[in-house]
Image (cartoon, grey):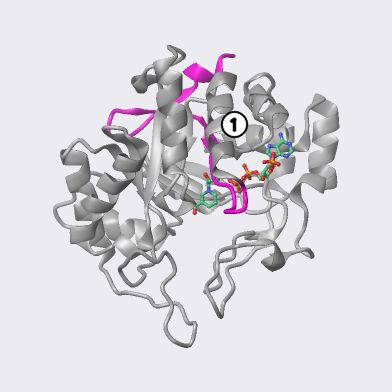
């Protein structure tokens, strides 16, 4: 099946491709590699590309998209591009300028989807993780509903076709859904989701509200924690080597053997069959091409049940701070 045509209808009438290319790579990965892999992903059949202000790669992702448009491979309307509002831009007057600054880097006229990255406000400014003189992260207090109203204005201004949230729990979603005068519902909630944290309750809730659940970290292998003291972004020293390696799970490996596919592909397929849109990051050409094969096979009802039973509510991205 051609990955280009596998899309889900959003509650605002737009469509989102069910497989997305995750573009995040740590800062040590050279930025020109971002251009190469994003072009490879489009050539392999990805039409949904996930990025964010925080990933510091929007210039390169935009360049890759525009170059695939220029060489005639795709049109702008074929691509579904997601960006995210970082937590230092949560004051309502900062929301639209933050999106405009992403668009300037991308050199695009609009994003298909703009998400509130985390339900956690940080002190406004250009420093992604502002800290005080003791090295403690500096938070801010902003009403989620006020941020949402500013997001709605971005949609009305035509800068974002759709708007949604990320890393929200049910209570935070309800704050928005129950907001007096709500103009647009979030179209999606992008959260960590994999067989060890299958988010089944949140998924049921989202489905009941016509909100799409989007899975990030669907094949994450080792726990990453933001350092509590400094609030530093995840880097190898804080990756907990004792956390369970999902892709080595014996049940996942047995299913992989049965279907003659890799455990990584089984983990992707699991999400699609439960109605979850899934992001797949890879900076490796062979694995980028492999990941679009998720449409070439099916898991049985029994396989799905076995995968459901792997849930242990284990969070790889702990966000302890
Ligand atoms: P992922 O898709 O779960 O993949 C994890 C790792 O698996 C990758 O680093 C990749 O390494 C490897 N991999 C990929 N395909 C594979 C395959 N076929 N076989 C074996 N290994 C494979 O990655 P993720 O970055 O955690 O999540 C995906 C995307 O979600 C991110 O890139 C980002 O766009 C988004 N995200 C959002 C949030 C949020 O807060 N909203 C948080 C985290 C991530 P190689 O590159 O070496 O192939």
Q: Residue beneath label 1, please?
A: 273
Q: Quadrant of residue 267?
A: top right
Extreme-top residue of the structure: 72
Q: Quadrant of residue 307?
A: top right
SS of the residue under disc 1: helix
Residue 120 magenta-highlighted = no
Highlighted magenta segment, given as a residue range: 1-29
Which residue is painted at 36% across and 48% down in the image? Answer: 115
Q: Is residue 183 visible?
A: no
Which residue is painted at 49% across and 42% down in the image? Answer: 214
Left or right, 64 with reference to 143: right
Relative to 211, residue 26 above or below: below
Taking depth in this image into account, of 80 and 30 the one nearest to the observer is 30
Which residue is painted at 37% across and 57% down in the image? Answer: 86
Q: Residues within 10 Å of mark 1 (few under 14, many from 20)?
A: some
Q: Quadrant of residue 77?
A: top left
Residue 16 magenta-highlighted = yes
Q: Is residue 140 visible?
A: yes
Taking depth in this image into account, of 257 and 233 the one nearest to the observer is 233
Quadrant containing ligand 1 reads top right
Classify the position of the N terminus by image quarter.
top right
Relative to 40, residue 180 above or below: below
Relative to 172, residue 310 above or below: above
Left or right, 284 with reference to 184: right
Residue 11: percent from left, percent from top: 31, 35
Residue 160: percent from left, percent from top: 27, 38
Taking depth in this image into account, of 17 and 102 the one nearest to the observer is 102
């Amino acid at each position: 099946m051609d990955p280009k045509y596998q899309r889900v209808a959003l509650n605002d009438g737009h469509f989102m491709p069910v497989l997305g290319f995750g573009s995040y790579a740590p800062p040590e990965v050279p930025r020109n590699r971002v251009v190469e892999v994003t072009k490879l992903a489009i050539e392999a059949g990805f039409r949904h590309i996930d990025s964010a202000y925080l990933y510091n790669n929007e210039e390169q992702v935009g360049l890759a998209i525009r170059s695939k448009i220029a060489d005639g491979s795709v049109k702008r309307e074929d691509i579904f591009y997601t960006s995210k509002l970082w937590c230092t831009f949560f004051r309502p007057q900062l929301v639209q300028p933050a999106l405009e600054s992403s668009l300037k880097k991308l050199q695009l006229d609009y994003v298909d989807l703009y998400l509130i990255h985390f339900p956690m406000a940080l002190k406004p400014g250009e420093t992604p993780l502002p800290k005080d003189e003791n090295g403690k992260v500096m938070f801010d207090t902003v009403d989620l509903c006020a941020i949402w109203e500013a997001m709605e204005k971005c949609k009305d201004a035509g800068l974002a076709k759709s708007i949604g949230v990320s890393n929200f729990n049910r209570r935070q979603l309800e704050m928005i859904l129950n907001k007096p005068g709500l103009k647009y519902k979030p179209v999606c909630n992008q959260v960590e989701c994999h067989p060890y944290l299958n988010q089944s309750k949140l998924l049921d809730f989202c489905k009941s509200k016509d909100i799409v659940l989007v899975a990030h970290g669907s094949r994450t292998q080792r726990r990453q924690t933001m350092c509590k003291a400094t609030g530093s972004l995840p880097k190898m020293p804080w990756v907990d080597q004792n956390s369970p390696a999902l892709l080595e799970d014996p049940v996942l490996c047995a299913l992989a053997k049965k279907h003659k596919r890799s455990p990584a592909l089984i983990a992707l397929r699991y999400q699609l069959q439960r109605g979850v849109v899934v992001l797949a990051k890879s900076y490796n050409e062979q694995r980028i091409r492999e990941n679009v094969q998720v449409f070439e096979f099916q898991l049985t009802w029994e396989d799905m049940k076995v995968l459901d039973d792997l849930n242990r509510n284990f969070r790889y991205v702990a966000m302890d701070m």
